[in-house]
Amino acid sequence: MPSVRYAFGRVRLVRSSLRMRPLAVTVLASGSAGNATLFTSDRTSVLVDGGVAPRTLETALEERGLPLPDAIVVTHAHQDHVGEAPRIAKRLRIPLYVTRATAKATLLSSKLDVRTYDNREPFAIGDLELAPLPVPHDAAQVALTISDGHACAGIVTDLGEIPPGLAAHLAGCDVLLIESNHDVAMLERGPYPEFLKNRMRSARGHLSNLQTHALLRRVTKRTHTVVLMHLSRTNNREDLALETARDALPARVEVMVAPARGLLHIEACPPNEARKMRQLSLFAG
């Protein structure tokens, strides 16, 4: 018999022995104007980075029929990732997870439920396990993998080079969200001042399409979908990023570009497993 929980005056059936929803990834924003990605499992919804306004987030999730987040995890202290996170946490009354370095670099109200996580130690939120790994950037930054015990997704943006251990960290990912920020030639010819170009191409800047290519050549057979993130609107083009990424990957891997704004929804488990889960859900209902 399923257990019964009471929530807001309604009876909700919880079937702990049967998975009803595969791990899903929803990109809401990706780029210098703001970043936010939702990871949703059977019973838990976690927002990685808070770079969109609370009402924008609520409207987007409501339109897609997705749950509001149970928590926010911030990867680093830059405004396009953390800027709206305190407001979201306050409005939704949910905890805000940050590394110690991010907590020191960000002015956070004592009224918020702020929880620190170690940048090398896995931690759990509900039925999701998150595993961080430090990556080089000009703010203390982490790559994250998020797993529900069945499927796994990885998100790694805002890094200037591929550090040792990153490919191994991402080896278990079914879906990989990876920065492909700029095309080297476009950056060189582009309008940015020289100091900003130097920052972009430095080891503490952002990945070029070619650097992303080098990492994608090392993806494992488990990865079935790659999403290119944080593309520069000035120094990159979608067709260039896609062409470079596809050259590094087997034909079986689906490759797409995350929009700067607008929902991109992906199921993290392999397509055949997702179909099985949907069939079980219908049977159980």
Image (tube, grey):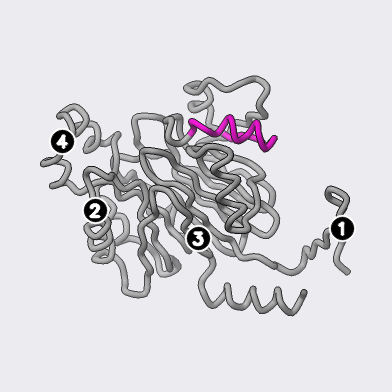
Secondary structure of the residue carrying numbered label 3: strand
User: Which comes sooner in the sequence, label 4 or label 3?
Assistant: 4
User: Which comes sooner in the sequence, label 2 or label 4?
Assistant: 4
**Which residue position is annotated with label 2?**
237
User: Which comes sooner in the sequence, label 1 or label 2?
Assistant: 1
Q: Relative to residue 204, is residue 284 depicted above or below?
A: below
Pointer 1: residues within 10 angstroms few (<14), some, or many (20+)? few
Quadrant of the drawing holding the N terminus: bottom right
Amino acid under label 3?
Answer: His
Q: Relative to residue 140, is residue 68 depicted above or below?
A: below
Quadrant of the drawing holding the C terminus: bottom right
Secondary structure of the residue carrying numbered label 2: loop
Q: Position of residue 119 (x, y in %)?
A: 50, 36
Q: Is residue 92 left or right of residue 193?
A: right
Determine the residue positioned at 30% across, 67% down: 249
Give the farthest residue toward the left.
Answer: 189
Amino acid under label 4?
Answer: Pro
Q: Within the magenta stretch, is there residue 95?
A: yes
Question: What span is in magenta?
Answer: 82-97
User: Which comes sooner in the sequence, label 2 or label 3?
Assistant: 2
Q: In the rendering, which numbered label is found on residue 265?
A: 3
Secondary structure of the residue carrying numbered label 1: strand
